[in-house]
Image: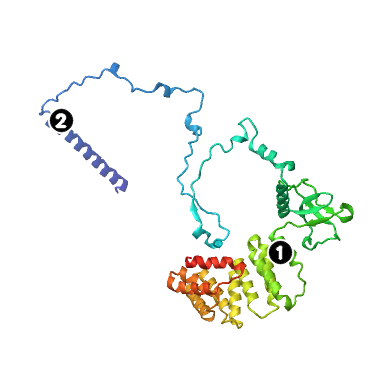
């Protein structure tokens, strides 16, 4: 009879289990036999503490009081903390520039100052109590001016200030506002077309009749006696600009250059001044073969931050027969120094100095460059040459002051 594999495995497992049970029983009896021969255990009495003497830790009874039906405090936003101003360094400022002072690029060098804020007590006490009028009401009440209380000089000064800010039309009374005609700079008396006029309150600068369309003033209907534009630098340039004919002649070259220079000097009044200067420098360049109009054009590019065009214009001048012109070389060197191309700038300024020993602009540019590059000896020589050849015209007073400031006079 064949023995199956399952039967063999069962018999082997039964033997293993039986042997393990026998071993455990034998080791337990031996341990009990060996333990019986030792000493008896010693019992120690530990008395239980008296629970009546236990007291809870002391607590603040007020801290436990709260309303039963309110939310816990950690679910509500915490009250705002008091704002503490962080320590800040005092802000620098500029002192007011004197009438004959340094140019604006030197304001920070010579006029910088640091001021601490000062608290002035009672500054607004006259505005009334807390229950009285607020600041807006006080301002509104001050907008109306009682002309009967003004002296003749104050009235004239106020009217002059109005004419510097607003366009005006004189009919049966004087109106201030804005002339909105597209060709407003070409309008002349007698009027041949209606004047579109938006009237403003000269005291506030707001529309006198809010939401109302501009009024068309006509000579026959409104009896216009005179009119004018606001007396601003830009309006004066525009009025002078329209006086030039469309076709310019060589005899007008000096007038055109003078007007372009004045427009360039008025560039801080608005970007339109720089556009007019560029326009008339281009017109002047068609009237002559000299470098002055193109130099003015490059200067307009620099003032308008169009430096690529300025570099291109200077390089075109050098390639166009002005490679030994000291002013062209000097201005190119100054522009290169602004972009920290110091080697090229020094090369061009030295060339300009060789060609223009008696040119104050060239020597001033070289001296200023050497001074900024910490070469005072060479700077002093160039500045002394600039001082000997400085311009004497009244409009060059700022240049003379600049040369003296660099020399330390």
Badge 2 density bin: few <14, some 14–19, many ≥20, Cα 10 Å: few
Q: Which residue is mark 1?
A: 237
Label 1 vs label 2, nearer the camera: 1
Quadrant for residue 128, please give it: top right
Residue 308 is situated, as x and y percent measured from the top left of the image, at: 59, 71
> Which residue appears at 49% of the width and 49% of the height?
115
Residue 99 is situated, as x and y percent measured from the top left of the image, at: 58, 59
24 sits to left or right of 69: left
Badge 1 density bin: few <14, some 14–19, many ≥20, Cα 10 Å: many
Residue 91 is situated, as x and y percent measured from the top left of the image, at: 49, 50
Nearer-the-camera pick, 192 or 16: 192
Q: Earlier in the sequence, mark 1 or mark 2?
A: 2
Q: Which residue is mark 2?
A: 32
Q: Indicate whether 133 appears above or below 371.
A: above
Judged from the image, the secondary structure of the residue bearing numbered disc 1 is helix
Q: Visible in this render: residue 193?
A: yes
Nearer-the-camera pick, 17 or 184: 184
304 sits to left or right of 115: right
Furthest-top residue in this view: 52
Residue 16 is situated, as x and y percent measured from the top left of the image, at: 24, 42
Q: How many numbered marks does the figure carry?
A: 2
Q: Visible in this render: residue 375?
A: no
In the rendered structure, find residue 249 and report the number of the disc placed on it.
none
Judged from the image, the secondary structure of the residue bearing numbered disc 2 is helix
399 sits to left or right of 32: right
């Amino acid at each position: 009879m064949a023995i199956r594999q399952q039967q063999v495995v069962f018999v082997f497992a039964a033997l293993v289990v039986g042997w393990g049970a026998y071993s455990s029983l034998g080791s337990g009896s031996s341990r009990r036999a060996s333990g019986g021969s030792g000493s008896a255990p010693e019992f120690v009495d530990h008395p239980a503490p008296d629970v009546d003497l236990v007291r809870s830790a002391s607590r603040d009874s007020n801290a436990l009081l709260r309303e039963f039906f309110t939310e816990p405090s950690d679910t509500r936003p915490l009250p705002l903390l008091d704002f503490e101003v962080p320590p800040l360094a005092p802000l620098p400022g500029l002192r007011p520039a004197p009438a004959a002072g340094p140019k604006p690029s030197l304001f920070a060098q010579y006029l910088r100052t640091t001021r601490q804020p000062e608290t002035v007590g009672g500054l607004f006490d006259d505005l009334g109590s807390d229950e009285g009028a607020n600041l807006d009401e006080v301002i509104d009440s001050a907008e109306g001016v009682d002309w009967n209380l003004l002296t003749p000089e104050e009235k004239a000064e106020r009217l002059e200030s109005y004419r510097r800010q607003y366009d005006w039309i004189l009919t049966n009374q004087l109106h201030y506002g804005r002339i909105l005609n597209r060709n407003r700079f070409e309008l002349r008396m007698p009027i041949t077309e209606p004047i579109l006029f938006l009237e403003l309150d000269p005291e506030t600068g707001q529309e006198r009749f809010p939401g109302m369309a501009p009024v068309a003033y006509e000579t026959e209907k409104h009896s216009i006696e005179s009119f004018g534009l606001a007396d601003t630098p830009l309006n004066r340039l525009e009025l002078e600009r329209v006086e030039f004919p469309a076709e310019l002649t060589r005899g007008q070259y000096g007038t055109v250059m003078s007007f372009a220079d004045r427009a360039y000097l008025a560039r801080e009044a608005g970007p339109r001044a720089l556009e007019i200067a560029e326009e008339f420098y281009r017109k002047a360049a068609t009237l002559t073969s000299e470098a002055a109009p193109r130099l003015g054009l490059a200067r307009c590019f620099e003032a308008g931050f169009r430096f690529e065009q300025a570099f291109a214009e200077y390089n075109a001048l050098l390639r166009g027969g002005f490679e030994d012109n000291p002013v062209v070389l000097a201005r190119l060197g100054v522009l290169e120094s602004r972009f920290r191309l110091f080697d090229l700038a020094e090369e061009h300024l030295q060339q300009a100095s060789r060609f223009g020993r008696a040119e104050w602009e060239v020597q001033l540019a070289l001296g200023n460059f050497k001074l900024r590059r910490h070469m005072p000896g060479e700077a002093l020589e160039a500045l002394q040459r600039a001082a000997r050849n400085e311009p004497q015209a009244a409009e060059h007073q700022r240049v003379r002051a600049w040369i003296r400031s660099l020399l330390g006079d």
